[in-house]
Image (cartoon, rainbow, N blue to C red):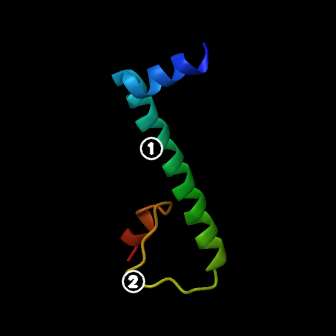
Amino acid sequence: MDITELYHFLFETPEGVGCLVGICLVLSLIVCVIMERRTRKRFADRPKGEDDWSIFDDDDEEKED
């Protein structure tokens, strides 16, 4: 498969456009998770407030009150 066939598949067929959209969604999800973890590590000493929420925490902690 040469570059012209790859270009035709990715940009001129519905399946190729779907692949591009899927790849972009997966990459952006990976970047968001990495950025969230780095931010959490950087601000680890900040006390958690009532309005704070997290993607990675379980809801079980809130039910203990």
Neighbor class of circle 1 (other Cα within 10 Å; few <14, some 14-19, many 20+) is few
Is 22 placed above or below 15 here?
below
| Residue at the left extreme of this rendering | 14
Contact (Cβ within 8 Å) of mark 1 with mark 2: no
Residue at 44%, 85% (x, y): give it. Answer: 49
Q: Position of residue 19 (x, y in %)?
A: 44, 29
1 lies above or below 43: above
Q: Amino acid at mark 1?
A: Leu
**Front position in the image: 56 or 24:** 24
Classify 39 as above or below 10: below
Q: In the picture, which quadrant includes the C terminus? A: bottom left
Q: Residue at x 45, y 44 (%)?
A: 25
Q: CA distance from mark 1 to mark 2?
A: 31 Å
Residue 59 location, quadrant = bottom left
Label ID, residue 35 = none
Seen at 38% across and 24% down, the residue is: 12
For disc 2, the neighbor class at 10 Å (few under 14, some 14 to 19, many from 20) is few
Q: Quadrant of residue 64?
A: bottom left
Say whether disc 1 or disc 2 marks the residue closer to the N-terminus.
1
In the image, is 39 to the left or to the right of 51?
Answer: right
Residue under the point 50% across and 60% down: 56
Q: Position of residue 28 (x, y in %)?
A: 50, 50
In the rendering, which numbered label is found on residue 50? 2
Which x, y percent locates residue 41?
65, 72
Q: Which structural element holds mark 2?
A: loop
Q: With respect to residue 19, does 9 lie above or below?
A: above
Residue labelled with disc 1: 25
Q: Give the residue type that dot 2 points to.
A: Glu
Quick one: 52 or 31, which is closer to the camera?
31
In the image as oriented, which residue stretches furthest toward the top? 1
| Image quadrant occupied by the N terminus | top right
Dot 1: element:
helix
